[in-house]
């Protein structure tokens, strides 16, 4: 065995990326890893609930708290409204009297709320490190380079960008600037129908699975009509002919939670629970969606369970906080609701918003200290709002 020694200790400096992954330092162009200023109350503090109530009561109508469906129960308890990201952003815009919009979700959601609310309102994210891995998979620089590739292939002028709501303000602005629209998981088909009325091809950002599932399952395209653009490979890993032949150019992005569900998960739950209904989110892989009984957005999932008959059995392929909440809600009605996968999985970044962060945020605001404000610059806001308005105009 060869042993290598060194007389001097190695001077190893952490890279900027390492610091981000450790939750230190800040990158204004990324949703990841920024320190939270101030001291958080201990998570074992027995007075947290009382403190949150007191701070919220002190703020009164000055604060409006939004809670995404994937948040912890301890946070949802203090939300004035709950919903998916776009619904919550619109709810915030409908409360112009609220000076502070506390968004219990992730970074791109707070950006959308800032875009849609008035200049007098201040959008706050309780933990700035609550980002979205999917949104981080498409940066403005990467998408601009992709558009250059499409231009060189001679297809940019017939390609319409469609970006999922789960994207950064920069990507929404790119979409608006290049004649495209935004979509949610509920209206993705309408958005694609609109896009194909205005062009021959679609560049779908940043979730490949929602784009593929909508095109193939809902619009009758084939898998061969879709190609995947990988921003980490030269020319996206595609030839000019492949780009010219494709109808759907799918960005290589995915949701870290929905992407974990597999065909084995579906087969396993059917074997364990005879007669189970498999209901999954369209961010799941195509083979999972194809094997499921029902497919739909978060709001669709909730409504499907509300309408389900007593005694029915459901395996849900979406984030665990929501599945647990639905299981508890519908158990008294005799409905059995289980998580699709045997291995539980929370959304790790969504889960960063906990009660200590919420208490710290509310108490800071109650004391007149504005913290963790999310602001989108005016030019980005203008083009992002243009793309959102195109979505709102969809039939």
Image (cartoon, rainbow, N blue to C red):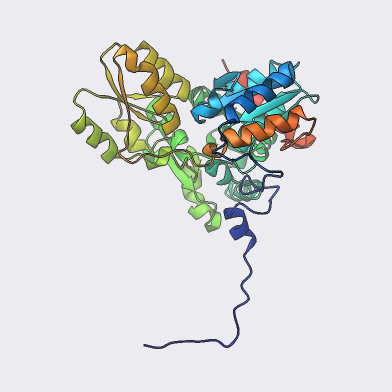
The answer to whether 271 is drawn above or below residue 33 in the figure is above
The answer to whether 236 is drawn above or below residue 343 in the figure is below
Q: Position of residue 254 (x, y in %)?
A: 47, 42
The answer to whether 380 is drawn above or below residue 20 in the figure is above
Left/right of residue 289 with respect to residue 30 in the rendered view = left
Foreground of the two, 21 or 242: 21
Left/right of residue 249 with respect to residue 2 in the rendered view = right
Residue located at (55% from left, 46% from top): 137
Residue located at (46% from left, 24% from top): 298
> Can you tell which quarter of the image residue 343 is in?
top left
Foreground of the two, 56 or 45: 45
> Can you tell which quarter of the image residue 367 is in?
top right
Left/right of residue 71 with respect to residue 116 in the rendered view = left
Is residue 268 visible in the rendered image? The answer is yes
Residue located at (54% from left, 41% from top): 349
Foreground of the two, 283 or 133: 133
Is residue 125 visible in the rendered image? The answer is no
Q: Position of residue 274 (x, y in %)?
A: 18, 25
The tally of labels here is 0
Image quadrant holding the C terminus, namely top right
Q: Position of residue 79 (x, y in %)?
A: 59, 22
Residue located at (57% from left, 36% from top): 45
Image quadrant holding the N terminus, namely bottom left
Q: Position of residue 114 (x, y in %)?
A: 71, 29
């Amino acid at each position: 065995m060869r042993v290598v020694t060194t007389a001097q200790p190695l001077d190893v400096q952490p890279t900027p990326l390492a610091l981000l992954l450790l939750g230190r330092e800040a990158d204004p162009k990324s949703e990841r890893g920024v320190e939270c200023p101030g001291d958080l109350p201990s998570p074992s503090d027995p007075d947290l609930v009382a403190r949150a109530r007191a701070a919220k009561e002190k703020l009164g109508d000055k604060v409006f708290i939004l809670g995404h469906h994937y948040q912890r129960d301890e946070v949802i308890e203090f939300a004035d409204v709950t919903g998916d990201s776009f619904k919550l952003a619109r709810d915030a815009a409908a409360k112009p009297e609220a000076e502070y919009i506390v968004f219990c979700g992730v970074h791109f959601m707070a950006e959308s709320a800032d875009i849609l609310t008035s200049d007098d309102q201040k959008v706050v994210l309780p933990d700035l490190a609550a980002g979205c891995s999917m949104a981080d998979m498409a940066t403005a620089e990467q998408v601009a380079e992709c558009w250059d590739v499409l231009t060189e292939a001679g297809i940019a002028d017939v390609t319409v960008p469609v970006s999922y709501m789960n994207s950064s303000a920069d990507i929404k602005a790119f979409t608006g600037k290049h004649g495209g629209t935004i979509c949610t998981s509920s209206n993705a088909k309408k958005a694609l129908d609109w896009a194909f009325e205005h062009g021959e091809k679609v560049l779908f950002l940043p979730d490949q699975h929602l784009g593929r599932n909508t095109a193939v399952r809902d619009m009758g395209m084939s898998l061969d009509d879709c190609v995947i653009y990988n921003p980490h490979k030269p020319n996206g890993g595609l030839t000019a002919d492949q780009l010219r032949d494709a109808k759907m150019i799918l960005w290589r992005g995915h949701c870290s939670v929905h992407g974990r569900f597999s065909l084995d998960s579906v087969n396993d739950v059917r074997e364990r629970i005879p007669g189970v209904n498999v209901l999954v989110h369209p961010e799941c892989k195509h083979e999972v969606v194809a094997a499921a009984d029902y497919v739909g957005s978060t709001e669709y999932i909730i409504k499907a369970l509300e309408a389900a008959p007593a005694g029915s059995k459901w395996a849900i392929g979406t984030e665990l906080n929501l599945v647990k909440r639905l299981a508890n809600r519908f158990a008294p009605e005799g409905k059995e609701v289980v998580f699709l996968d045997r291995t539980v999985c929370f959304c790790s970044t969504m889960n960063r918003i906990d009660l200590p962060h919420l208490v710290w945020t509310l108490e800071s605001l109650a004391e007149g200290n504005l913290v963790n404000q999310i602001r989108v610059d005016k030019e980005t806001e203008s083009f992002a709002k243009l793309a959102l308005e195109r979505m709102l105009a969809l039939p």
